[in-house]
Image: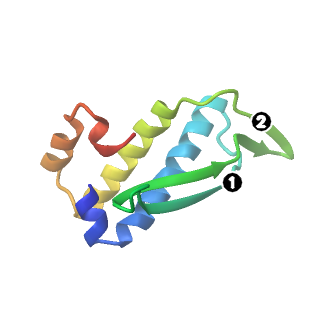
Amino acid sequence: MHGYLRRIRRLGKLLLRSAWEAWQEYLHELLQIRDGLSRGIFCLQTHGSLFNFHPHVHALVLPGLVREGRFHELKGCSVTAVTVRLRARYLTTLKNQEVLDSDEIERLMSWNHNSGFN
């Protein structure tokens, strides 16, 4: 995954969009509110603590949804559940953008360490 993000910079925007959509999907599913609104700030950081190439997303999100002027708070969050949604959305996006094919996605999904998503 790192190689694709390093060579094809537009994939960073798609990663951020996938992260936002995964968070929205998670909120809507857990709170059972289909038309609620949330907000968040998502940032793509491309280096690690040693300034090596290590793309990852930082997010500051509203922990719930607003509907009809009322805030519906999410009590607790499963990072694993959000990560699973993010991985599925991003890999689907990469397939739709013809960056990966079905065989490559299947291979990534078979890895024991979340195929780079954690």
| Amino acid, disc 2 | His
Q: Percent position (x, y) of residue 83?
A: 44, 39
Q: Quadrant of residue 99?
A: bottom left
Q: Which residue is mark 1?
A: 39
Q: Which residue is mark 2?
A: 72
Q: Quadrant of residue 53?
A: bottom left
Tell me if I can see residue 50 in this picture.
yes
Instruction: State how many labels appear.
Output: 2
| In the image, farthest residue toward the front | 50
Q: As displayed, is residue 90 above or below residue 31? A: below
Left/right placement of residue 102 relative to residue 48 reads left
Tell me if I can see residue 97 in this picture.
no
Q: Report crowding for label 2: few under 14, some 14 to 19, many 20 or more residues within 10 A (C-alpha).
A: some
Left/right placement of residue 30 relative to residue 50 reads right
Residue drawn at point x = 48 percent, y = 59 percent: 16
Q: Percent position (x, y) of residue 42?
A: 57, 58
Residue drawn at point x = 31 percent, y = 44 percent: 116
Q: Earlier in the sequence, mark 1 or mark 2?
A: 1
Left/right placement of residue 55 relative to residue 22 reads left
Q: Report crowding for label 1: few under 14, some 14 to 19, many 20 or more residues within 10 A (C-alpha).
A: some
Q: As displayed, is residue 51 above or below residue 75? A: below
State which quarter of the image contains the C terminus.
top left
Q: CA distance from mark 1 to mark 2?
A: 13 Å
